[in-house]
Image (cartoon, helix red, strand yellow):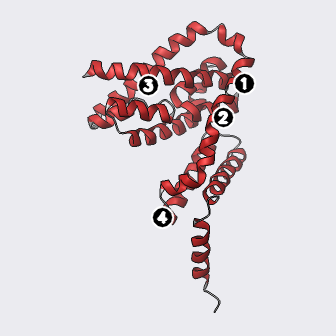
Amino acid sequence: MIPSGHAAIAGLWVYLHTQPLLWLTATLAAYAIGVVLHERAGRSPLVNTVAVAVALLVSMLLATGTSYATYFDGAKFVHFLLGPATVALAVPLFRNRQVVARAIMPIAAALLAGSLTAACSAMAIAWALGATWQTVLSLAPKSVTTPIAMGVSERIGGSPSLTAVLVILTGIVGAVIATPLLNVLGVRDWRARGFAVGLAAHGLGTARAFQVHEMAGTFAGIAVGLNGIATAVLVPLLIEFLR
């Protein structure tokens, strides 16, 4: 007997669901769709490639009842590539090393001010809105890359899983609003624009910065690394002071 349409689709899904390359393919397809939509929107920051891909993948996981663990098991090769991609940030840094060397003092000042502002402002707003103390703590490292943020969150008493979600949201929002916001503020220096985006929106902001200008991407990459170190040192000290 030839199975009905619904039964055939269900049978196909059961088969595909067991294949390790399914979610890797889905991830790449979602990102490709995001790229196409981003290009068709005139590269508008409001149509962010990563945001589109995340929305598509989350919708697919919810629709199929697939757990994150199952998804990650199939798509972990993309996670592995984060390492080489991060190391690759050293290439534009090396090419622009003389420009970076001349801006050491402004970088140090911006790092200190930006790192403390990113943590304190998020905590203060959450506290004013009546969030629990654990939620407030989970927000403190939301502007650094996920592994560092989760480690800092666990150390200070926050929720690492909540922090991971907040980090992703911070990166997406930062990548979307950074360009129009900096344009409105009249910031024209690519070094300042890039460093601000990288510090506030970590890797996703850095990816957006590279789409706009190489110099902005270079300084965004510097900000990601330095802010990770600064947050790991300063936030625990800040929490101890507040306690």
Of callouts 1 and 3, the N-terminal one: 1
Out of 74 and 48, give the one closest to the viewer.
74
* Amino acid at circle 4: Gly
Place of residue 53 in the rendered image (x, y in percent of width and height, measured from the top left): 60, 50
Judged from the image, the secondary structure of the residue bearing numbered disc 2 is helix
Q: CA distance from mark 1 to mark 4?
A: 41 Å
Residue wearing tag 4:
65
Most extreme residue toward the right is 95
Judged from the image, the secondary structure of the residue bearing numbered disc 3 is helix
The residue that appears at 66% across and 56% down in the rendered structure is 25
Mark 2 touches mark 4? (CB < 8 Å): no
Q: Quadrant of residue 92?
A: top right
Of callouts 4 and 3, the N-terminal one: 4
Q: CA distance from mark 2 to mark 4?
A: 31 Å
Residue wearing tag 2:
85
Of callouts 1 and 4, the N-terminal one: 4
Place of residue 83 in the rendered image (x, y in percent of width and height, measured from the top left): 62, 35
All told, the count of numbered labels is: 4
Most extreme residue toward the bottom is 1
Q: Residues within 10 Å of mark 4 (few under 14, many from 20)?
A: few
Mark 3 touches mark 2? (CB < 8 Å): no
Mark 1 touches mark 4? (CB < 8 Å): no
Q: Is residue 19 visible?
A: yes
Q: CA distance from mark 3 to mark 2?
A: 25 Å
Of callouts 2 and 4, the N-terminal one: 4
Most extreme residue toward the left is 243
Query: Disc 4 vs disc 3: which is toward the camera?
Result: 4
- Numbered label attached to residue 91: 1
Residue wearing tag 3:
118
Direction from residue 66 to residue 43 in the image, left or right? right
The residue that appears at 57% across and 81% down in the rendered structure is 7
